[in-house]
């Protein structure tokens, strides 16, 4: 059976990096039993300019009827604040993608680019942030009164907390993690107090896992002081947004970071965490690895292809030892374009899949 994959190329560097993500999927298709059908699902700033909507109904229908969505990045300078970006919230809310999975893994080959390279980093950085993706301040409940008062309500529901925390415990167990860290602000915020109570309740069913609670402000500095200390980190929407950008900085470049917006068992969306990068768009220099690792997550989470996912990761590691895009360049290695980086990873993958 063919899996249907919706493709949103988006704006700026979006189309350039998505092209490389698709290259990897086509290589997988050629050298495995899997087969894919791609369907364009246009969204973003360019689409807004043409149609007055950043997520046309037709696009949403295509996405809803697919097995997964590969998403580039959207946003065009000069458009009214948020019009393009609202497509992302529309997809996350519309498909109830309550898990935002953000792996923060420093490849051995990239240790030279880690901002902490002169500091002790134990046996490396390899953690995953499991962020709640539909509630909190981003539930967008609020308003502005007389241009004087602005309010957003921080909504945490019991069922919303339970499903994301349960997912995180399952994730930790599946990956043989020893510890799970919950990040909140329970000393001040009521929603965090509900969150912590539920974390402790669910934690009772996982006696083998070490459980840890941290306040978000303290966590921000511990993530820099001892990033090697964390494995699964579960947190709410706002805190997850902030700490995952901090984490992305630790792995060498924003262009390296991948993510999944997931509703287990239903259509889910995979995207690099960077934006449309208008400053480098159209130059064929963007790093496609964040997108390629998002494809890896798609194969792992939506299609349960753990072996192929692992092969993609190994291919990236090998490629990084030979060449780099400009954002992670190393003077001793060849500097590659977006296309060349994708080609090199695809070549590596071919040899793994043929074995
Ligand atoms: P950005 O992530 O687009 O760029 C920040 C910096 O990182 C820039 O210097 C850029 O050149 C660099 N960068 C980003 N991706 C890169 C890659 N793959 N390879 C090498 N360098 C890379 O963030 P910025 O500038 O704040 O936002 C630009 C636009 O993107 C805005 O309209 C923003 O709203 C939108 N945006 C969209 C997102 C999405 O579609 N998921 C996420 C974040 C921002
Ligand atoms: Mg963010």
Image (spheres, rainbow, N blue to C red):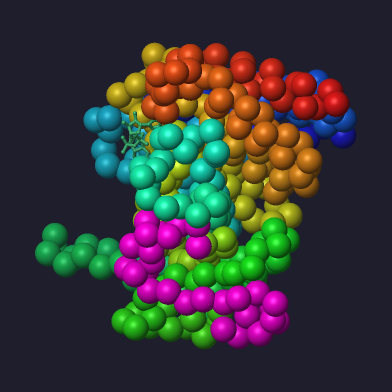
Q: Residue at x 61, y 66 (%)?
A: 168
Q: Residue at x 87, y 30 (%)?
A: 33
Residue 243 drawn at (x, y percent): 40, 57
Q: Quadrant of the N terminus?
A: top right
Write the start and end of the magenta stretch as one range: 200-229
Whether 209 is among the magenta residues is: yes
Instruction: Judge left or right: residue 261 versus residue 37.
Output: left
Instruction: Judge left or right: residue 190 versus residue 41.
Output: left
Up-down: is 12 above or below 140?
above
Residue 66 drawn at (x, y percent): 70, 39
Residue 103 drawn at (x, y percent): 55, 49
Up-down: is 325 above or below 101?
above
Up-down: is 61 above or below 130?
above
Q: Name the residue nearer the viewer: 340 or 70.
A: 340
Residue 141 drawn at (x, y percent): 37, 66
Q: Is residue 211 visible?
A: yes
């Amino acid at each position: 059976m063919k899996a249907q994959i919706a493709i949103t190329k988006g704006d700026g560097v979006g189309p350039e990096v998505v092209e490389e993500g698709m290259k990897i999927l086509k290589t997988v298709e050629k050298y495995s039993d899997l087969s894919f059908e791609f369907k364009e699902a246009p969204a973003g700033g360019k689409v807004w300019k043409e149609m007055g909507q950043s997520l046309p109904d037709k696009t949403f229908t295509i996405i809803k009827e697919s097995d997964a969505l590969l998403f580039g990045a959207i946003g065009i300078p000069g458009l009214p604040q948020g019009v393009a970006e609202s497509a992302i919230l529309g997809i996350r809310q519309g498909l109830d993608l309550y898990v935002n999975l953000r792996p923060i893994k420093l490849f051995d080959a990239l240790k030279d680019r880690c901002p902490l390279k002169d500091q002790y980093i134990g046996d490396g950085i390899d953690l995953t942030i499991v962020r709640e993706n539909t509630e909190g301040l981003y539930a967008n409940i609020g308003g502005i009164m007389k241009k004087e008062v602005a309010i957003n309500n921080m909504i945490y529901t019991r069922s919303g907390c339970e499903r994301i925390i349960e997912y995180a415990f399952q994730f930790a167990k599946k990956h043989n993690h020893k510890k799970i860290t919950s990040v909140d602000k329970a000393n001040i915020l009521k929603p965090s107090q509900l969150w912590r109570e539920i974390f402790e309740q669910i934690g009772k069913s996982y006696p083998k896992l070490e459980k840890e609670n941290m306040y978000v402000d303290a966590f921000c500095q511990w993530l820099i002081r001892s990033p090697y200390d964390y494995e699964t980190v579960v947190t709410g929407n706002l805190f997850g947004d902030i700490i995952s950008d901090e984490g992305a900085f630790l792995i060498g470049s924003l262009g390296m970071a991948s993510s999944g917006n997931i509703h287990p068992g239903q259509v889910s969306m995979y995207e690099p965490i960077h934006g449309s990068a208008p400053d480098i768009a159209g130059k064929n220099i963007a790093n496609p690895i964040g997108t390629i690792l998002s494809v890896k997550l798609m194969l792992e989470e939506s299609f349960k292809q753990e072996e192929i996912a692992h092969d993609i990761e190994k291919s990236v590691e090998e490629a990084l030892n030979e060449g780099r895009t400009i954002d992670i360049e190393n003077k001793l290695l060849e500097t590659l374009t977006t296309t060349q980086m994708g080609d090199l990873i695809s070549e590596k993958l071919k040899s793994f899949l043929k074995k």
